[in-house]
Amino acid sequence: MQANLEKKAFRNKSKQIRNNKQNLIMPIVILSVLILVSCALFLSLGINPGSTNYALSKRIPKLIAIVITGGCIGFSTIIFQTITDNRILTPSVMGIDSLYVAVQTVIYFVLGSASIFASNPKINFLICVVFMVIGSLGLYKLIFKRENSNIMFVLLVGMICGTFFKSLSSFMQMVIDPNEYLILQSKLFASFNNVNVDILLLSVVIILLIIPFVIDDIKFFDVMSLGKDQSINLGVDYDKIMRKSLVIISILIAVSTALVGPVTFLGLLVANVTREMMKTYKHSYLIVVSMLVSIFALVFGQLMIERILHLTTPVSVIIDMIGGIYFMYLLYKESRI
């Protein structure tokens, strides 16, 4: 009798585990199908019969850039929220992409557009990556290594840093040569119609090189979501993984920003939608779903605006408007707790 009860309990537990796994896999399957359909429509809608090859030669690099951007933003936001232990913070809110704008402005202001550091897209991109990594490590020293840094202090420092970089950029843009400013302007505003295809291959290579360094750490993020003290007690080298993660996040944000420009609130929306969809602590699922949600939002949004509604408003403007409203809602919600 006891043996039968144990077998029944084991079967029920096994069935529950299978159902939970199916519930986690189903959103991944649905999002993957939606992305494939959106990509097919994005590539095929509005093509004239005689210009198929020309249209695809323009659309395919744009689509690849959108997919890379979405994947980078989705991945980096989930990891950033885990290591900071907060669902409001994102790399963009902390002013990391404002640093990209400041670096670009300084290059054009000091060296000019004729300089190899501005005219060569690959060198320009690598310089931005280096400075963003240095900025992230400085942020780690300034904020995240402090004991008991509350959310308001972190937000305050992030907003001050972002405001400083934006003010510095604005000042230099006002006194810069108008011709230089026109060239600079195309790099500073998010536009999926003006994708920097010159660094597309370099971006793919950098992401492929990063993947081996990230895969081994995913299991540690599950533990780090418990908090710093619990992670250290469970044997995780918290500071080492945090520094490594900040470097990777900086590189990914640099890739996405260099390809299409800054998209401030996409990560905030994507991360919170993912956590609402996936009631799990496992980052192997959270990361994949956040990347898929981000890619779908960008591809479908660009498809609707460019191919169906024929609007001239960039999709990034709509995303930032919705994300800004949602960010204020989250701040209001936190203040009520």
Image (cartoon, helix red, strand yellow):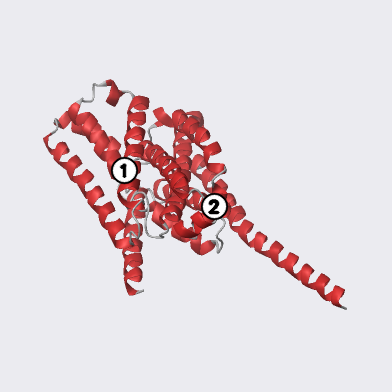
Q: Secondary structure at mark 2?
A: loop
Residue shown at the point (43%, 47%) measured from the top left: 239
Q: Is residue 228 left or right of residue 194?
A: right
Task: Determine the residue positioned at 41% across, 57% down.
Answer: 269
Quarter of the figure with the C terminus: bottom left
Between residues 237 and 24, which one lies in front from this camera angle? 237
Viewer-side residue, 138 vs 209: 138
Locate residue 86: give its quadrant. bottom left
Residue 278 picture quarter: bottom right
Estimate the x, y position of residue 208 in percent, counting from the top left.
52, 34
Give above or below for 221 relative to 202.
below
> Who comes first in sequence, dot 2 or dot 1?
1
Farthest bottom residue? 1
How many marks are shown on the rendered structure? 2
For the N terminus, give its image quadrant: bottom right
- Residue at point 78% right, 68% down? 10
x then y, percent, for residue 193: 37, 39
Badge 1 local density, few (<14 within 10 Å), some, or many (20+)?
few
Q: Amino acid at mark 2?
A: Gly
Which residue position is annotated with label 1?
A: 138
* Amino acid under disc 1: Gly
Q: Which residue bears the numbered disc 2?
A: 235
Percent x, y for residue 332? 32, 69
Q: Is residue 267 above or below residue 250?
A: below
Tell me the distance, in whole angstroms, between the alpha carbons under discs 2 and 1: 25 Å
Q: Using the image, determine if residue 330 lies above or below residue 268.
A: below
Whether residue 157 appears in this view of the structure is: yes
- Do the CB atoms of the residues marked 2 and 1 lie less than 8 Å apart? no
